[in-house]
Structures are given as structure tokens and as C-alpha cells.
Image (cartoon, coloured by chain):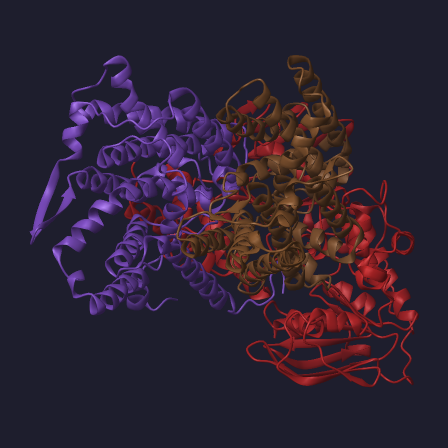
Amino acid sequence: MSDLTERAVQRLLSERDLVALVAMGLVVLAVFSLVTDTFLTVISFQVMGFQVAEVALLSLAVMLSMLTGGIDLSIVSVASIAALVVAKGFAATNAATAGSGRALWLTVAFIALGLLAGVACGLVNGFLIAKLRITPILATLATLQILNGIGIAWTGGVTVYGMPNQFLNVGGGYVYHVPIPVLILLGAAFLTGVFVNRTGIGLRVRLVGANPTAARYSGLNPTRVLYATYVASALLASIAGVIIASRAASASADYGASYLLLAIVIVVLGGVSPLGGYGTVTGVVLSAFVLQMVSTGFNMVEFSAFAYQIAQGVILIAVIGLNTLTQRYGGAWRSRLLRSRRRAAATGDPSTARTQ
Amino acid sequence: MRSIPWNRLRGRNNEGVLVLSIIAFSIAVGISTPSFWGWPTLLDLGTNSLINLVFAMGVLLVIVSGGIDVSFMAIGIFSGYAVIILPNATGFGADYAVVGFATAALIGLGLGLLNAIAIAGLRIPTLIATLGTQGIIRGAMLLWVGSKVIPHYPAGLDRLGNDYLVTVHSGAAATRLSVLIIPAAVICVLVGLLLRYTMIGRSIYAIGGDEESARRAGIPVTGIKVFIYVFVGVLAGIAGMMHVTRVGLANPYELVGGELDVIAAVVLGGASIFGGSGSVTGTVLGVVLITLVKNSLILLGVPSTWQRFAVGLLLLVGITAQALSARLRRRGPALAPGVAA
Amino acid sequence: MSSAEPLLIAKGISKRFGGVAALQDVSFDVRPGEVHTLAGENGSGKSTLIKIITGVHAPDAGTIVFEDQTFESLTPRQAIALGIEVIFQDFSLFPNLSAAENIAISTHVAERRKVVRDVDSRRIAEEVVSRIGIRLDLDAAVEELSVADRQLTAICRALAQEARIIFMDEPTTALTRREVQALFRVVASLKERGVAFVFVSHKLDEVMQISERITVLRNGVVVANGDVKEFDRTALVRAMTGKPLTDTPPSDSVRADAAPILEVEGLTLAGHFADVSFAVRPGEVLGVTGLLGSGRTEIAESLFGITPADSGSVKIEGRPVRIRRVRDAVRAGIGYVPADRLTQGVFLDQSIARNIIAGSIDRLVGKLNLLRRSAASAIVSRGAKELRILMPSPEAPVRSLSGGNQQRVVLAKWLTRNPRILILNSPTVGVDVGSKHEILDMLRDKAGEGVAILVISDDVPELVAVCHRVLVVREGRVVDVLEGDRLDEDEIVKELVA
């Protein structure tokens, strides 16, 4: 990857960009509030709250894998597998018509099972990437296919229905007017943030992503770190899957397939570097909210959902492209400041140019 | 030094292994279903693989250059769909299939230019750039070109869709090999020649090997990248047009989602995801293997819902084998990486 | 040989980057068929000078005269057309293409060819290879070639472009002594045909063997230039740093009566080294030297757990230790400064602070694996102070530091763990002479504190300056131990070349 792109992408992460993100959010808020009169209402924000959680969780999952310099493409399939485990469980035990006591504990049990299934998928990814040393993009491409295939074969291509109300409450209920999915998101985001920023293993994740060789020579075990990363990523994806199933009151092998692009847009907009080592949970969550506002706003002004898809692509290209451009023509002062005179001569060593 | 005959047989990109796999697989299937050994199998193979073959040729160029493209299916269906809509809307291009194909190629060229701008111009990493353009192209198609299925075809295309090169009758059923196999084969040969015998092709390998060194050697890296993505666009347009012709229905929701099958075929065919290696032969074999597996599943009575799983498993086996053999090779003399030992 | 009339004259070159003057009124000339060494520590401006001459940058002032043409600035294409070629340390080759194609590709590009066949590349390559009389497997993919063969391929590529002057950046760093001699033979034969070489190198001893003239840059200014015969090493080093090289003999830190801290017995790793045994006492600095590929690095890295040995025993402070992974070594109190700083030693884009605590994470986590921030900061300040790291702030990325300072960061990473044993591999490569002295001084201090130190190196003066004993490794076995009177530069070189 070119030196220029690398620096451009890193520029995304300075604090100024978090401020820029907040500013963007406020602008979007302002625009849509002015253009429609239903945007700036409690109900509207509650609806957005319900919708944002699942894709935000998927984005956090992508962020984790990107921190290690890889990418987890399989998250949408992991989410759908988790959803299917829950749904099939309910179908098999007729939970939808069970008494409330039994339904409650069935709900808890199958959610746990769904999350466990997700963790199992994460372990498989970890094995392929850490032990077999298959490059993450290929490994998760394969697991994406395989898990999707398992899902299709398991359901015969048919959507699974039949869920108890206790479960539907997870995706549709409130706690003091706050949608439960939002609470789940905030909780998961908080824990992820602690994981990434405050724990030893989080630091190891960043370092392994920044330079796996140096990590090894520093005594950090990349194998453990990679396992932890992909299991955590799969766990987040399965939580998302559970929420998706709860909101849709059903599960299918193809749910969430369109979320992959959106998750990557969110992550990139939120300042995560695809090259590894950089990114913040705050940025990702903020970015998810901003994009959700855009989606809802589009809906309200009756832009088609297709327009939203176009917007996602445009935002993705614009954000990274703009950074590369400003780096090339305007950001030069920054890189020069960073480079002392000594370092300028030291860059006669070309191994700094390629960090692939 | 390398032991010559064994390595030559194996092929630089493990083509030999692929051939063996195909033979082994065929034997395995043939044992349980003797009807496998017949012309229909071969013809079906040809007909079902030709579209992915054309897509794969474009993807091969991208992967050899060190990038990855996930937007080609979107380009394909956009082009094909648009061409079908055009005559209905404007009456243009109704009679000759060639006009339709040329238009599709042109549309693909334009869409490929989007990728070229994002990747060569804005220097955006290829996976992200093509994810973005895929969204834009698909959204734009559904929003502005149309989102309905079109069953009425202009006359020329109708004829082409039903034009077959070979027809084999077995009892009551007839299996046909679409005449579109000819342009598909021609494209494969052309791409092969491009990669082996032209400076553009060698430059693509060079860029995949070490982009910075390519720049230093005077290779016009940006120009070549523009060429690659525009070329992929053209091929995607043609392939999309082929698909739409064969199916007889223009359904804008098709094709997208099948990118992984093509990428899997190219990777199975020996191209390294990091760039710098890959061949037309390998890619063709990869496409053949995947199509063979999918067809055979049907023949064996396996429900079509298992197809995706099968392809995924195949891909997994392939990349695991590649990773393991790379590790074995690396366990050679130089254990300690770095400049001085 | 070199005639008097220069081929290339760079006159009064000045270049500023931002507010910083990289070059000030530098003049430099190259005669046909000469070998000219361009010396200077990191930051001297030598890289900038090369980039200007090869067209990557344009100078702010000054001119470049090539034969009879004068230029205010050059583009890379112009430079190549004139015959000015540069070979960087990574050789800029295509690992996936054959040697023949690598050699011929620039020619193809320059000729604006559209169609090209294997035979075309081969023809060009064979012509060049026979011209300089070397043997090269032209069909092998470059990634399969040895480092020395890759370098030859790069030289052939420059020659295929009718190079008149070839700049080589650190040409001998990755070569064994035998390969260096082979390289010099090639250079000598090319000199006779009028091709000039400019070597940019830290390895003064080697390149001075073959150079006719030397130009020394310091802080962007030429501080010395002239015939190599007029200089000796001391004078050169003084010119480069402004400081005389003091070869302090090792201190008496060795506690001869104390039990050894590290005892290695019969260490073997199939294919790399066999039956290696030695002991290191507290306060002792043991050198390990040998040619490239002799196994010296593998021995060190097996002690550190990177490539664990098959058999043999390791005892630390009398207790047997099993080192199967890096973590075992670190826990046993071993620290390792690897040879390739940029890829193995530092996390270039991470902060200095993170780099320093990277080695101590296990000691900084408390309940629930949470990091103890204050303990971490304490480690960072201690490391920065002890190693005297010159930095704007601990949050600055390591990339912004000079090579010498980066090496201090790597040292800080391990020293903040108070290791019992410190292993260093080529510790002063790519480090400016000033830092080099400080690092060697620091090693002596640590030895004085009772740490056992292992220095893997092929820098002979460095070994003599800091080691009490030196093990000579050849083909995986320890063939000699030099100490006392036998520990001097000539003796070591003799052992290596034997």
C-alpha cells in the first residue's frame, strides 16, 4: 500500500477528526430537522436507536479485526448463524406458545447458545488466521461463504419464524424510554473500549496489528492475540445477530448481508485504519449514529433506500479520497514537521516505505 | 536449483495440482453416478462456466496487480440490465446483438473508470474502493435505471440467447452448449496473450511484485492501473450482457452476491492474493473446478442449498493448502529474517 | 582507471526542507571509472544529495554538470538517460519475476516496447551477464536468489541501461565477506570500462579497500574530501562526527569468582548450529562473531525463543531453563535487541511510550487484565532517562526519531525489565557514530552492574572495544574463543576470513 495512503489514513485518527465527526453529526441533525418536522422528535430518535444497534455492533466487530491489521469479512454470516441458532431453538421447542416462565428461561438459554455459536465461529477464524497463518481477508472470505452455506443448507433457504415475546422484547422493548438495543450497544461498546484501551491484551492487539514481527520479538504472542481478536469480533457479531432476529421476529441465512458495506463505511468514517494499530470505539459509535441519522433522514424525505446505498459508497470514497488528496497537497507541512532533519536522511532506507 | 520436470508439470501456479484435483473429483463423482461420463456434463460445464470465466479474466488482472475487486458483478448487471432497458425505452439497438454487447462493454468501461479514479487517482485501498463503487453502482442502477424484471428482449438478443453451438440429445432431454462459449474462449486467449507477451501484462506482474520498484523502473503505474480497472469494467459489461442474454430475463437483483465464486476461482487457480502471480490457465481451471463441483452436486442429488457451502469448503481447502505449502517452503535455510544474520 | 576529467560535477548544491537545511553549498564530483565513497552519519545529507543527483528532488540552488551538459535539476528519466543509476538497499527488484526479466525490464520500458517475449529479456540479460563475466541463474525468480545474487541482478539491470555512474546504498551490509570480495571484483572489472561507482556506506573499512576518493558530509556540508590514501580511520571518524574515536578497552567488570549467569551446553538446532557450549559470568560481555550464515544469529535467537533449539541445555543462575517460546526467555530474564530494527525492533508508527512498555505488558496488568497507567508512565520515564532518548514527547511516533534514538528505544524496552542477560544483534548498524559510542558505553555500564551481555556482531572494532571474550562461529560450530592478547582486530578478521 502506498506510503501516501498510509499516512492519509492515519491522519483520520487524530482527535481533530473526532471533533469533525461530531460536527458532521450536528450538521446532519440540523439539515434534517429543518427539512422535515418529524426528525427532531423523541419517537424518531427512539426508532433510530432500535435501528442503529445491530450495525454499530457489526462495525465494532470489524474495528477489532482491523486493529490487528486484518479484516473480518465473515461477521454478517456469524450474525446470521447466531440468529438462526436462536430461531431454530425456539422453533424446535415451540417457545412462541410456551408459558411465560418457560419462555423466559428458553429465551435466556437460546441467546446464550447463539452467542456460543458465534464464539465457535470466532475460534475457527482464529485457528485459520493464527495457526494456519492464512491471510485474514482470504480466511474470512472462506468462512463467510461456509457459514452462509451452512445457514442456507440448515434452513433450506426458508425464513424461520416463531419467537416468544420475551425474546422480542430484547429488540423491541424500552427501559425508561430508551430502546433496549441502544443499552446493549452502549454496554458492549463500553466493554470493547475498555478492552481495547485499558487492558494489556488490547495493547497487545494494537501492537500486533501495527507490526506482527516486532510484536513477536517483544515477547507478545500473536497467536493468542489473534484468537482473542477474532473471538471478540465474532461475539460482537453474534450479539448483533440476536438483536436482528429479535427485531425481525425471524431469522434467515441472508439477513444482514447488506450490512458489510455499511459496517466498513462506519468504521472508516470513524477513524479506524485498515492498516492496523489505530482506531477508537468512540469514533466508531459516533460514526454509526451519524450514518443512522442520514439513513433515517433519507427515509423521511423519501429518498429511496437505494439512494442511501449510493450515499454509503460516496461517503466511503469521499472520506478516504479526501484525506489522501489533502495529504498530498496540503498536509505536507505536518509530515515535514514530524520529520526531523536527521530522519530525512535516514529515509534513505527504503524499508520504511513498505509496511505491508 | 529446481528439479526441472517435476516443477514444470506442477506449473508455476500449481496448475498441475488443479488438473489432478479435477480428474480426481470427476472420477469420484463418476463412480457414484455413471451418467456423469457423457457429453451433457461437458456441455453443461461449458455453458455454466463461460460467464464466470469472462468475469474471472478481469478479476485475474486485478489480483495479479495486487488488488482486489468486489464491484465487477455490479458493473455486469448494471450494463446488461441497462442494455435491455434501452431498446424498450428508446428503440435503439433492437436488432443486432452485437450492438447490445458493444453498448454493454461501453457502459462497463465507464463504470470501470469510476474504479480507476478511486484507485489510481485517489489512491484508495482496492477493497474499500470497490466496496464503495459497488454500493454506488448498484444503488444507482436500482434507483435510476430500474428495479423491475424485464422479460421482453430485443429480437437480436433473443436469437443469440437461443443460439447454440452444439446440441446433444440423450433420450428426451437435450443439452446445449451456448454459442457464447466462443467469445468467452477468445477473451481467455486474449488475456493470456496480454499477460505473457505484452509490456502492459508484464508491467501488471511487476506492479504486483513491488509497486514502488515498478515506479522506479519507469513503469507508468497509474496509467496501468487505470487500464486494469477500465478493462475489468469492459469485461464485466460483456459478461453481464452474456448472463442477461442466456437467462432470457433481465433481473437487476441477480449476479451481485456471486463475486465470491469468481474470486475463489481465481485464488484457487493459483493467484496469490498479495499480487505478482497468477495465470489464465490456472484461473480457467479454477473456474472449471468450481463449476464442476456445483454441477456435480446437482447430479448427485444434493439439494442446491448446499452449493454455497461446497464452494466455501473448496475455497478453504485451497487456501489452506496454499498457506501450508508456503510455510513448508519458508522453512528453508534462512530462518532469521532481516538484513544480516 | 579514473582519468582526470570528471564525468559528473554537482556544484554548490543547496536544499532546504521546510525550515531545515539538508544541504548547504555542497560540491561533489565523480570521475569515470573511479570508486568514490560518500560517507556521513544519518542526517548528514548524503541521502538528499543522492536523491538530487538521481532526479528525485530538485535543488534549491546549484547545478549538475554531466560531461558537457549543465542542468539546474534533473528528472528521474533524465538521470537514467544520462546513465546515472541508483541501487537502494532493497535493490528495487521484482521478486516474482525472473532475473532475466528484472534485468531487462527497464530497457523494455525505455524502448517503449508494446510486445515483449521471454527471449528478448534473456538476450539482454545474457549480454550484460557475459559482459561482466559473472554467473547468474537467469530463469530463477528473484525471490529464490541469494542476497548476493540479487545484488548482482540489480547491478546488471543498471548496466543494461548503459549506466555510467552507479550509486550503491550500503552495498556490503547484507553480504558475507566472501560475497563482498566477489562484488569488489565485479566493480573492479567495470571500473576498467569506465563505469564509476559511488558507494554510500557506514562500513568504512570495506569500502575504503576499493575506493579511490572519499567525500565526507556532516550536517549538510562537505567536511572532508580527497584521496582515500590521505585518510585513516580515526581521521575519518573524526571528520564524520567531530569526535575522535576512543577505543576504550573493556572495563574490569567481569566477576571472575562469581558463578556464571548463563551456561549453555551442547545446544543444537538441526541445519543451523550444533553442539554450542559457552558460559557468561556476571559483568562479562561475550562477543559472538562469524560470517553471514554461520549460525551466529540463530544461536542468539534460539536462546531468546524465536527458533528454539532441538537439544542441549540452558542454565540461568544455575537453574535449568526450557526455552520453547519468546515468553519463556523473557520470563527467565533475557532481553534481545534484534538485528533488523525497523521490522523486528520497533513499532514505527506507535508512540515511543508504547514501544517502551511493549516488553513489560505482563508486569503492568492488574485485575481483569487492566493496565496500570501510572506504573506504565513510570517505566517510560525511567527508560527515556536511562537511555537518554532524545524525543519531543513520549507520545511522538518512533518513526520520527533518528536511527540511534530508535535503537535506544529498543534498549529501553528491555532494560526497563532489569534483565539478567542482554543479547544484542548488530547493535550499532544504522546508528550514528555519536549514538554508537553512547550505546557501547551503556553496555559497559550494564556489565559493571552485573548483567551478562552477549553481542552478536561482525563489526570488528566494536567487538574489540566492548567484549571481554569473543566466540568465533563457523558453519554452526564454535571454532575458537578469543580473549586477552588474542582479542584484537587482526586476529578476528583472520578467523573470519579463514
Q: Write down the quadrant of residue C137 in the picture.
A: bottom left
* Chain drawn in brown: A
Image point 61% across, 40% down: which residue?
Answer: A55
Q: Nearer the viewer, residue B232 or C240?
A: B232
Q: Nearer the viewer, residue A95 or A20?
A: A95
Image point 65% across, 36% down: which residue?
Answer: A50
Name the quarter where the C terminus of chain C is drawn. bottom right
Asked whether the viewer can see residue A98, the reply is yes
In the rendered image of this protein, which colour is used for chain B? purple
Q: Is residue B230 above or below residue B331?
A: above
x and y percentages locating residue C438 in the rendered image? 86, 56
x and y percentages locating residue A214 in the rendered image? 69, 57
x and y percentages locating residue C371 in the rendered image? 84, 56
Q: Write down the quadrant of residue C261 in the picture.
A: bottom right
Looking at the image, residue A302 sits to the left or right of residue B74; the answer is right
In the rendered image of this protein, which colour is used for chain C? red
